[in-house]
Amino acid sequence: MGKQSRQELRELWAERIDAFLASGLSQRAWCRENGFNHGRLSYWLRKLRAEADQPRNGSWVSLDTIAPRSSGVLFRIGSVTLEVQRGFDAQVLADVIRSLMEVC
């Protein structure tokens, strides 16, 4: 295999991990069937899981409210719930939603 960038290698192993997880096989059995080293699969499983568990960098936007809580609306974007109150700034909301879509 030729020289690959770190990102290409990460993407390749992410695809292999997906195939392994979908197979229902043990790590050793999957590696045997597919000609991979068990240690390498274990390494990438740990690495990709650790990356997934790390919080992503982003910026937070403050939303000021002027109405009682019952006058708001809830948005669910991925695993994030966002409550918006009456009187919000529409541009700020658009920026928050765009930021959430990038990380969720």
Image: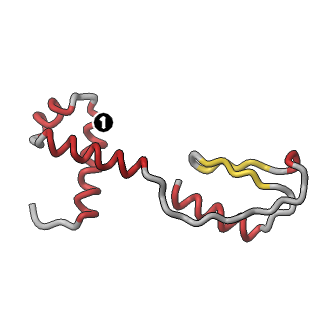
Residue 34 shown left or right of residue 61 in the figure: left
The residue located at (24%, 64%) in the rendering is 6
Q: Position of residue 75 (x, y in %)?
A: 70, 50
Q: Position of residue 104 (x, y in %)?
A: 53, 53
Residue 26 shown left or right of residue 85 in the figure: left
Residue 61 shown left or right of residue 52 in the figure: right
Furthest residue toward bottom = 91
- Which amino acid, mark 1? Leu
* Quadrant, the N terminus: bottom left
Q: Which residue is mark 1?
A: 21
Q: Position of residue 54 (x, y in %)?
A: 43, 52
Q: How many numbered badges does the structure rendering display?
A: 1
The residue located at (14%, 41%) in the rendering is 39
Rendered position, 90 above or below 74: below
Q: Position of residue 55 (x, y in %)?
A: 48, 54
Q: Secondary structure at mark 1?
A: helix
Callout 1 environment at 10 Å: few (<14), some (14 to 19), or many (20+)? few
The residue located at (57%, 45%) in the rendering is 79
